[in-house]
Amino acid sequence: MHTKKALPILFSVMFLVMVGFGIIIPVLPFYAEELGASPAQLGLLMAVYSFMQLMFAPMWGRVSDRIGRKPVMMLGIFGLAFSFFFMGAATELWMLFAARIIGGFLSSANMPTVMAYAADITSEEDRGKGMGIIGAAVGLGFVFGPAIGGIFSEMNLALPFFLAGASSLLTFFLVLFILKESLGSEEKRVQEEKTSFRKAWNSPISILYLLQLFVSLSLSGLEATFAYFAAEKAGLGTVELGYIFMIMGFCGAIVQGGLVGKLTKKFGEGFVIQIGIVTSALGFALILLVNNFATAAVFLSIFGIGNGVIRPSVSALITKTATTGYGKATGFLSSFDSLGRIIGPPLGGWLFSISIGLPYISGILLSFAAFLLYYVYKTQSKKLPVSASSAEG
């Protein structure tokens, strides 16, 4: 499929997937409470999904290298739809846990496979643009999903789960009937499958996985604590916070969809990663100065723009320099992202309990560590093939 036709379809796929995922975010805590969940059980319910993603994303990426992107993508989306419908029909708490485990296991196929598909159909020059478009779809999905979930939960707490299932089912048929397979010949698949993943892990590319872990840690720590921080510093409530996160999501999506491709083409992925890390650190520092709605919206958006350009640039750089199939490489990246999302919220909460500004000071330190990691990667990447050199910044 031609890139110009495929990228809008991939955008639609990830947008609908993330809308479905986002719909349940504001509802799940209340729904689980209704089924008798304690705060500790609610924490486990949230964490088990990310844990399944951490464990199985590399496996699905590897499978997509072998059998093709489309069937793995369809399985992941169908699994997500099933888990949403199962949650909507749940009458006991164990059913919610079962749905989250099944959903996490199967839907962990989505992100690495979509990113691998984008890598398949884009040239190295346009790789950043492709990954940026995927990132923009994810960001916009998170903007609209929670808003839809919040509105429909007022009618019935189970209704958002069925809406999320319908969104995923629609996505499944979109992939089934419109999206064509991106992998070429069987010979290419076999060649990719035989490449040792250990070779990739022992190469400088592993530094980029650690960089993504630090970025994910700092983001999830902020997401877990900012509502309490904004309430204490500026007296902001849930409605204002919803608008603030919506503004941040829009700013991040616009930059990812429109600017990442141009910047990476002109300056290289490495330059964009470094700019993104510096902007994120600046955002963290500014957040400490929040005192009203306007400052919260502006400062959080500065952070969101910086954070938003890092992931697509890292994804593009990894697929350019990977010695394995794209699916393996992006699957492992998704695992590190999930690991950050598992560790980040409790770490952020613990730091917040010591001092309300500590999660953001730690965010600055994590950004500094990520910047140093990129410098180490850049130094060591001279060992990589020549094709990677164009990505240095």
Image (spheres, helix red, strand yellow):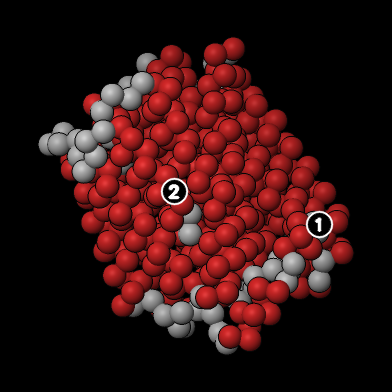
Q: Which residue is identified by label 2?
A: 104
Q: Would you say 165 lies left or right of 200 here?
A: left
Q: Residue 270's mark?
A: none
Q: Nearer the viewer, mark 2 or mark 1?
A: 2
Residues packed near mark 1 inside 10 Å, few (<14), some (14 to 19) or many (20 plus): few
Q: What's the residue at 63%, 86% (across, down)?
A: 187
Q: Would you say 143 lies left or right of 161 here?
A: right
Question: What amino acid does circle 1 point to?
Answer: Asn
Q: What's the residue at 70%, 74% (across, down)?
A: 194
Q: Which residue is identified by label 1?
A: 202
What distance separates the C-alpha of mark 2 from that of mark 1?
28 Å
In the rendered image, the vertical position of residue 187 relative to residue 171, given as above or below: below
Q: Quadrant of the C terminus?
A: bottom right
Can residue 185 be spotted in the picture? yes
Question: What amino acid does circle 2 point to?
Answer: Gly
Q: Position of residue 389 (x, y in %)?
A: 79, 67
Q: Position of residue 352 (x, y in %)?
A: 55, 18
Front residue of this view, candidates 212 and 64: 64
Can residue 291 be spotted in the picture? no
Q: What's the residue at 80%, 48% (across, down)?
A: 375
Q: What's the residue at 58%, 33% (across, down)?
A: 343
Q: Quadrant of residue 205?
A: bottom right
Labels 2 and 1: the sequence-earlier one? 2
**Mark 1 secondary-structure assignment:** loop
**Mark 2 secondary-structure assignment:** helix
Residues packed near mark 2 inside 10 Å, few (<14), some (14 to 19) or many (20 plus): many
Among all residues in the image, which is located at the extreme left? 155
Q: Position of residue 161 (x, y in %)?
A: 25, 45
In the rendered image, the vertical position of residue 172 relative to residue 380, given as above or below: below
Q: Quadrant of the N terminus?
A: bottom left
Q: Position of residue 16 (x, y in %)?
A: 33, 58
